[in-house]
Amino acid sequence: MAIKADYHLHSSFSGDSHASMENMIQTAIKKGLTHLCFTEHHDIGFPYQEGQAEIFSLNPDAYLFDLIRYKEKYGEKIHLFYGVELGIQLSVKKEMLRFVHEHDFDFIIASTHICHGKDPYFDSYYENRTEKEAFEEYFLTTLENIKGFDYFDIYGHLDYIARYAKDRGFEYSYSQYSDIIDEILSLLIEKEKGIELNTGGYRTLLSQPNPTKDILKRYQELGGDRITIGSDAHKTEQVGDYFVEAASLLKELGYKYYCVYEKRIPEYKLLT
Ligand SMILES: [Zn+2]
Ligand SMILES: [Zn+2]
């Protein structure tokens, strides 16, 4: 496999996964991966329904404790890293900063999961407005987040909202939102932040990674070269999912390298 590093996955330390960390590590080794970075969810200020458990609140110490044990056990077979996927909401910026400063992460993904208190996963997000308005809010929120928060390495699944577009009968393409998306990509490049190719999109009706091909192409055209690959696995068998497709897509678009991070410093790996 040309890509040997999965930099986006969720074990049972994320509230929406039941996958055992050890099983995921063993699967990664079997699939020939050399680098694995867990990126457990932490969404401060998540708008939970009444009575719902706060599942997107991470226990970073318990997570690190287990990871260190597995580093000792599997360290000769695979490099394991301590990452987090931080759901960005500027309304809790102070709390987010405190959290990232208190923990020594190798890698931080910033993600837009919630837009001004609303979740694009639910129908209510789209009520009383056009599809275009709903999507624009998603991308504008991402742009605001990048302007207002610096403490991350790459922006996660840049067009995450598109994962659910087809289910709702929406037609989505980069060209409809190219002005906002170009501004996002240019700002990331200026701030020396990267993006990811998240293969989770292949598992949905979108049948493409997030972000989609046109955005990956545009990022490169604008001079971007920091890209990580992540399966967004929430199940053991999804580790390293669609990496063959991801490698051939990146090569087709002219990418020569992908990135791994340790102690928040990128290292470029040749895409063979
Ligand atoms: Zn996410
Ligand atoms: Zn994720």
Image (cartoon, helix red, strand yellow):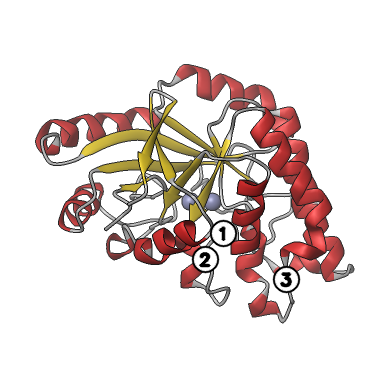
| CB contact under 8 Å: marks 1 and 2 | yes
Q: Amino acid at mark 2?
A: Gly
Q: Quadrant of residue 244?
A: bottom left
Q: Quadrant of the N terminus?
A: bottom left
Tell me the number on the disc at residue 172: 3
Asked if residue 194 shows in the view, the reply is: yes
Disc on the earlier residue, 1 or 2: 2
Determine the CA span between mark 3 and mark 1: 12 Å
Label 3 crowd (10 A; few <14 / some 14-19 / many >=20): some
- Residue at point 72% right, 35% down? 187
Is the CB–ligand 1 distance for label 3 below 8 Å?
no
**Furthest residue toward bottom:** 169
Q: Amino acid at mark 3?
A: Tyr
Q: Quadrant of residue 17?
A: bottom left
Disc on the earlier residue, 2 or 3: 3
- Looking at the picture, how far across and down is residue 175, in whole percent? 78, 64
The kind of secondary structure element at disc 1 is: loop
- Looking at the picture, how far across and down is residue 73, in whole percent? 10, 36
Residue linked to disc 1: 210
- Which residue is at the front of the view, 56 or 187? 187
131 relative to 191, above or below: below
The kind of secondary structure element at disc 2 is: helix
Residue linked to disc 2: 201
